[in-house]
Amino acid sequence: MYSVILVDDEVFSRIGLRNLIDWEACGFSVTGEADNGEDALALVRRDKPDLVITDIRMPVMDGLELIRRVREDESVSDTEFIIISGYDDFAYAQKAVRYGVVDFILKPVDDGELERVLKELANKLDRDRLERERQTLLLNEQMVSALIRGDAQETEIGKWAESQGYRP
């Protein structure tokens, strides 16, 4: 199950999103909500969600600034974004594409469209997770082989040990 945070300054929009979608069937669980980008940024940094669904125009910090700041923060830069907006503005969509958002959906939200996007994203996240696990296994096998052969360098050993949770 992947985590999602809903961000919209309109409380009824957040309630509607929460109740409109069968989150579990799409592979997600709503773990938090915020009514502006600044509060959302704090939530993202604290909870490290897999997905943020955000409006663009909000007080304090807008959705595009939220996305930009998350993308710059390496500890949460893997978080995916879907923008839901009542504004069909090409400039917004263009910036969203630059920031690598998953999708840009116009309000009123078509539940079928959003569920399709969520299921596709869950499948992508599954594939990404499997690939990371495969890469980790491969790296571990290579490091163990190098250790057995005696040709592993100290810096490589240190990095590998740290990645495995070992502290010298």
Image: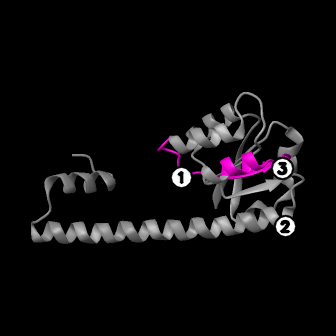
Question: Which badge, 3 or 2, comes first in the chain's sequence?
Answer: 3
Please name the amino acid that badge 1 sits on. Asp
**Which residue in the structure is indicated by mark 2?**
112
Q: Nearer the viewer, residue 165 or 72?
A: 72
* Distance (Cα) linking label 3 and label 1: 26 Å
**Which residue in the structure is indicated by mark 3?**
88
Q: Nearer the viewer, residue 29 or 45?
A: 45
Please name the amino acid that badge 3 sits on. Asp
Disc sitting over residue 78 in the figure: 1
Please name the amino acid that badge 2 sits on. Gly
Of discs 3 and 2, which sits in the foreground? 3
Which segment is the magenta one?
A: 73-96
- The residue positioned 88% from the left and 50% from the top of the image is 16
Q: Is residue 80 magenta?
A: yes
- Mark 3 is surrounded, within 10 Å at the Cα level, by few (under 14), some (14 to 19) or many (20 or more) other residues, namely few
- The residue positioned 63% from the left and 43% from the top of the image is 67
Answer whether labels 1 and 2 touch (C-beta < 8 Å): no
Residue 128, image x and y in percent?
A: 52, 66
